[in-house]
Image (cartoon, rainbow, N blue to C red):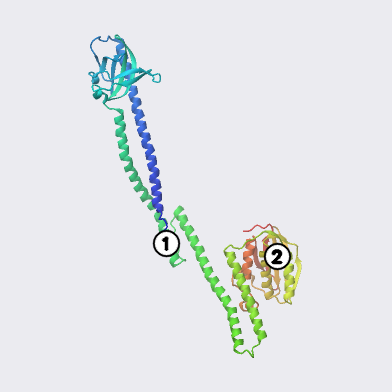
Amino acid sequence: MGPKRQLSIRARLTLFFVISIAVVLAFTGVALVNLVHRSLVTSATNQIEDAFAQTQARFATSTLSPFAEVVLPMHGDVVVQVTNSSGTKVWAASSAIADAPVLAHGSVDATARSGLALTLVHSPRTAGTLSQISEGQVQTIATTRGPGLIFGYVYGTPIAHSVGVLLVSVVISFPLLLLLSGGLIWLGIGLALAPVESIRRRVDVIAARDLSERVPVTGGDDEIARMARTVNAMLDRLESSSKFQQEFVSNASHELRSPLTTLLATVERAASDQDNANWAQVTDIIMREGRRLDGLIEDLFWLARLDENQIETISVDVDLDDLLFEEAQRIRTMSELSVDTSMVQPTRVVGDPSMLKRMIRNVVDNASRYATSELRFGSRYDGPFAEVSVADDGEGIDVAQSARFFGRFVRADSARSRRSGGTGLGLSIVTDIVTRHGGSVRFVEVAKGSKVELRVRRDGQRS
């Protein structure tokens, strides 16, 4: 079973906004219907109360006929009916319901504002009139016949009918509005995402064809322009990384091929003439090239782990002066070079001991390859930094061009370095280590030979 297919961003955004609009429209429709209903009820209540006041004023100043039913004028959409207290006889009624029988009875209700509640009388005689009225109210009234009840109703245009018409209008119009909104949102999001899709297609072509090409950047500083610039910056890094990887693989292959070729050629010559072969020389060549291969593979492995951030680092107190004294003893044991440590001062920093030891050893090994007779070590504090220097009395280098020697597979003298076991990676590793310890490395000008100056932070802060 394949992975579940998801909706596109355009479809998901459109669905989200359509649902949001639907919720808003639903609340709006309910609020609108409720508001209109309340408004109609309030208006009807006011009209009925006004009709009650006019009717009571008329009956207070005129004599009510003891036999005939009084026909009252209409009060807008309001009709009234006056009955006796027992609700058995109609004394007066508006013209629209003049022939109607008693339509309702009044009963005591303490919760009502007038103290009376209205109960409609449902019968075949009242059915036609009841279908035309709504929102009834009842009050007591004083007449020349005695106390009675006055009933008021909205006539001809029932509130329920008006609210029903509004509700039907809302139910019909809101889906159409929602459909129209959904279409506009779909088009708008499509237009907004069109530049993004254009950038995606462009990056797809660049990734498959040529990393040197770039995404066109539109003017302005909106999200699309910033994304295009970010994508181009990423492509710059990818192109640099790709070129660096290709150069690294090419250089590594070349460096590995050279000692292997020497080993194979030496063994083949010795095997072809075993009786006359100089086995001591063969052994010396195999050991020398084997050590060179071992050193190169170790450096390559270390750099690969460093590039992938797989080297675990610790922070402890490290005495750089002790590391220099150890290196001085090692060089004196392994070679005839003299080592001057008179400038080494107590210098303690916080850092990774194995990295700092490798840093100093790589610089010392590099200097020993080019030294004629002497190496000079030094260490001291310089503000927040600890400074270590390693100098030799060799031929020296052009300090102005020395920055390139800290790149990978770069040598001042390739032939001489290979004979002495150099891999061209030592100073590159030094650069990575001092950078991790918040420092720097450089060649400085001296009267004779060359001198490397290392600076690392004393407090262990890393970049």
Of 42 and 362, the residue lying toward us: 42
- Are the residues at dot 2 and dot 1 in contact (C-beta closer than 8 Å)? no
Query: Residue at (58%, 81%) from the top-left corner?
Result: 261
Q: Label for residue 39?
A: none
Residue 318 x, y percent position in the rendering: 71, 61
Residue under pointer 1: 202
- Of labels 2 and 1, earlier in sequence is 1
Q: Residues within 10 Å of mark 1 (few under 14, many from 20)?
A: some
Q: Which three-letter amino acid code belongs to the residue tagged 2?
A: Val
Evaluate whether residue 423 shows in this view: no
Residue 458 x, y percent position in the rendering: 69, 58
Q: What element carries label 1?
A: helix
Residue 90, compared with residue 299, is above or below; it is above
Of 461 and 283, the residue lying toward us: 283
Q: Which three-letter amino acid code belongs to the residue tagged 1?
A: Arg
Query: Residue at (68%, 67%) from the top-left corner?
Result: 360
Q: In which quarter of the image is the C terminus?
A: bottom right
Query: Residue at (56%, 76%) from the top-left corner?
Result: 254
Of 53 and 403, the residue lying toward us: 53
Q: Is mark 2 on a helix, strand or loop?
A: strand
Q: In which quarter of the image is the N terminus?
A: bottom left
Evaluate whether residue 392 shows in this view: yes
Outermost residue on the right side: it is 342
Alpha-carbon distance for marks 2 and 1?
50 Å
Residue 296 x, y percent position in the rendering: 61, 73
Dividing the picture into quadrants, the one containing residue 428 is bottom right
Q: Label for residue 388?
A: 2
Residue 316 x, y percent position in the rendering: 69, 59
Of 335 and 92, the residue lying toward us: 92
